[in-house]
């Protein structure tokens, strides 16, 4: 059975209620419990559509376990069409586990953490790049000095690249992980728009995860070789103007390869932007106007990475990125 419900988070100035709408899908077994959520940042839309399509497709009679699905967590930011709630301006993904008597954002975080995260065995937290920041589909493994997450849930999405980088206190994946609830941050596309290519990639990743952990029948598609990368690079504009990219998210680039150019304004001169290292393009700027120090590309270099051993389960598929690396004679150090 699929149930649609809502729960109150807080009240606004006029006394109106701020409610979280959510769905519960009960399968033929109670366990495991999977939490699916999106729009922790209110303008990140692809994940909302991924969840809604999964709910359309799922057959509870063939589901092993229970799904709690919260398509829009940051409801106030979503209504405003912004990343954060416009009054308190707090980043919801920096205040978990929240406060029962805090700001509107902190109260949303508290209720979400208490009512959903603590009930789950694991989860997928769907995100997208900020506006103008188009990201290839990939999970982000965040760690701190006192927390290192297991890689298996992140790898179960079936992506070729696994992003590994230090996180910050208050992030959902970190705070949930500390209480034994592995939540996978899954980046797909760009905020402020719906993109079918990235919606499909997100849906495939969620289904792979569910198949890997036995919630759906069938075998997940897992690359025979997945790459864990740790060297995150932001390539910034050193002149103002209009940025024209030559590459797309997911492409392999060599050191000194042109990523694009900036047409300087008002002179009209072209300034080529090069990759500083052999890398994969995690994200590219999709909005042409740039100022000094605007990031135009996001890379993960192959200098600090490793090829992970094969997963125990799944249909093994070839890695396109590794094939391209071999073709271009790029090695992981």
Image (cartoon, helix red, strand yellow):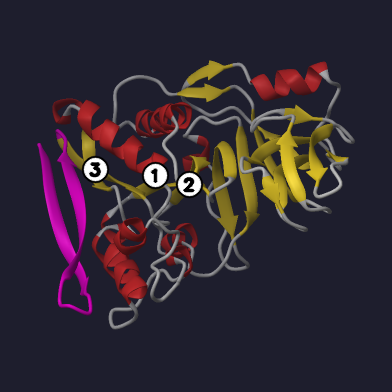
Q: Main secondary structure of the magenta part?
A: strand
| Nearest the eye: 299 or 148 | 299
Q: CA distance from mark 3 to mark 2?
A: 25 Å
Q: CA distance from mark 1 to mark 2?
A: 6 Å
Residue at left offset 84%, top offset 31%:
254
| Nearest the eye: 123 or 88 | 88
> Which SS class for mark 2?
loop
**Left/right of residue 55 with respect to residue 45 in the rendered view:** left
- Quarter the C terminus occupies: top right
> Which SS class for mark 3?
strand
Mark 3 vs 2, N-terminal side:
3
The residue carrying pointer 1 sits among few (fewer than 14), some (14 to 19) or many (20 or more) residues within 10 Å by Cα, namely many
Residue at left offset 71%, top offset 55%:
294
The mark closer to the camera, 3 or 2, is 2
The percent position of residue 159, horizontal first and vertical second, equals 55, 31
Residue at left offset 35%, top offset 36%:
50
- Up the image or down, 220 lies above or below 299; here it is above
Which residue is label 1 attached to? 45
Q: Residue furthest front?
A: 266
The percent position of residue 95, horizontal first and vertical second, equals 44, 71
Mark 1 vs 2, N-terminal side:
1
Q: Is residue 236 visible?
A: no
The residue carrying pointer 3 sits among few (fewer than 14), some (14 to 19) or many (20 or more) residues within 10 Å by Cα, namely many
Q: Which residues are magenta?
A: 1-28
**Left/right of residue 70 with respect to residue 15 in the rendered view:** right
Which residue is label 2 attached to? 191
């Amino acid at each position: 059975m699929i149930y649609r419900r809502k729960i109150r988070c807080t009240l606004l100035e006029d006394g109106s209620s701020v409610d979280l709408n959510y769905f519960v899908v009960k399968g033929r077994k109670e366990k495991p419990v999977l939490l699916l959520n999106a729009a922790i940042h209110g303008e990140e839309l692809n994940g909302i559509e991924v969840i809604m399509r999964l709910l359309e497709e799922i057959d509870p009679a063939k589901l092993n376990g229970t799904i709690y699905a919260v398509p829009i967590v940051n409801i106030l930011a979503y209504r405003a069409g912004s990343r954060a709630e416009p009054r308190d301006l707090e980043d919801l993904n920096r205040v978990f586990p929240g406060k029962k008597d805090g700001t509107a954002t902190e109260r949303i975080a508290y209720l979400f953490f208490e009512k959903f995260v603590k009930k789950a065995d694991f989860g997928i937290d769907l995100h997208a790049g900020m506006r103008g920041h188009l990201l290839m589909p990939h999970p982000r493994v965040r760690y701190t000095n006192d927390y290192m997450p297991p890689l298996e849930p992140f790898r179960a999405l079936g992506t070729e690249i696994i992003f590994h980088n230090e996180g910050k206190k208050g992030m959902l994946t970190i705070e949930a992980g500390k209480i034994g609830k592995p939540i996978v941050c899954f980046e797909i596309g760009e905020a402020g728009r719906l993109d079918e290519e990235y919606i499909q990639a997100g849906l495939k990743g969620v289904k792979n995860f569910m198949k890997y952990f036995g919630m759906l029948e069938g075998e997940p598609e897992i690359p025979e070789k997945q790459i864990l990368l740790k060297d995150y690079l932001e390539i910034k504009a050193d002149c103002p103007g209009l940025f024209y990219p030559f590459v797309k998210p997911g492409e392999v680039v060599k050191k000194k390869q042109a990523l694009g150019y900036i047409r300087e304004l008002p002179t009209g001169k072209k300034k080529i932007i090069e990759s500083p290292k052999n890398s994969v393009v995690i994200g590219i700027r999709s909005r042409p106007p740039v100022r000094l120090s605007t990031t135009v590309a996001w890379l993960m270099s192959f200098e600090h990475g490793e090829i992970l051993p094969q997963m125990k389960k799944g249909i093994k598929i070839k890695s396109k990125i590794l094939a391209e690396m071999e073709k271009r004679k790029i090695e992981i150090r």
